Amino acid sequence: MGKHFIKNRLLERIIGASFSISIFFIVIISSSGFNFFEFHELITIPAIWALFFGYGIISSIFIDVIGKFIPNFTGKQILLYFLIGYPLFLVLMPIEYALIAGTIGGFFSLLFLFGKEKLKPLKWYSWIVIVIPLVCLVMIPMDHTSKVGWNEVTGDTFVEVEYEYFNGEHLIPIHGEQGERIYFDVEHHFKNGNSYGMSLYDENGDYAGMNEENDDVSSVDFKKTATKYIVVQAINGEQGQFRVRWWKEGETVPDWAK
């Protein structure tokens, strides 16, 4: 009986977390205009999942333990679920941002509570809430970049691209020997679009550190011989072009192809 009770309580919290994160994902993808690349960038952040299925479930257990010592707990439970959205952000953020994030967190904590209390594990329809998290997990290894009218010219130390539409990221490999520093710059323009940017990935596809040399030039140090990737990004870019060039320390800055 004890094991069944514990299992049931845990399943309730998994359903609560799934319901809350599903609403969160629906809000995010709707506000992005159903831009799957932007949405994919969010769901690949481990902290998002840990917040709902880690912090959320642990906080729920903590509140239930407190409730055993508080009479007439139902009304107070709602307040505690809302307030539990604040402590984590108060630790991680300045107070003015923590209050905003905590209020949002409190709202999703109440959704967690609603899912936990109203969607019981023995009801088949309660498990519908896990569909969205499962679909998001399936999406994680997929590439959601879109390119239309892509015309690319590649040289030994440069890449130039013109495109009709670009939403996502384009990776440009650069190889460095141990102890080398490689400099690079990126020029990117489009007629219409939401935003564009640049970052750097290591050989495993994780974000790598880079140095800002000046307004236009960045550099990367190679502690070991490896290939890293200059990442050019655009969100709904139309009728655009970008140019990337790179050179080693002490070399002449290469000319563009045209």
Image (cartoon, rainbow, N blue to C red):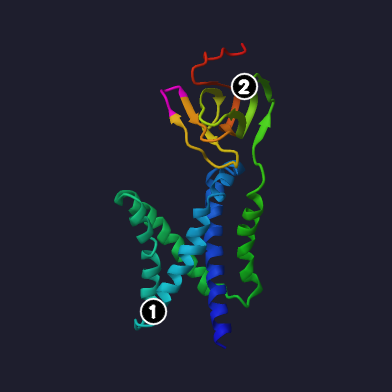
Of the 4 image quadrants, the one containing the C terminus is top right
Point out the residue furthest to the bottom here.
1
Of the 4 image quadrants, the one containing the N terminus is bottom right
- In the image, residue 219 above or below residue 102: above
Q: Earlier in the sequence, mark 2 or mark 1?
A: 1
- In the image, residue 81 above or below residue 49: below
Task: Examine the structure image and report whether residue 184 is included in the region drawn in magenta.
Answer: no
- Indicate the position of residue 53 as horizontal and vertical percent values: 52, 63
Q: Main secondary structure of the magenta part?
A: loop
Label 2 sits on what residue type?
Answer: Val
Q: Which residues are magenta?
A: 212-217
Give the residue at mark 2.
Answer: 159
Give the residue at mark 1.
Answer: 67
- Indicate the position of residue 216 as horizontal and vertical percent values: 45, 22
Q: CA distance from mark 2 to mark 1?
A: 62 Å
- Indicate the position of residue 123 as horizontal and vertical percent values: 63, 76
Q: Nearer the viewer, residue 214 or 86?
A: 214
Q: Residues within 10 Å of mark 1 (few under 14, many from 20)?
A: some
Residue in the image at 37% along x and 70% along y:
80
Point out the residue furthest to the left here.
95
- Indicate the position of residue 165 as horizontal and vertical percent values: 64, 29
Residue in the image at 49% along x and 31% along y:
221
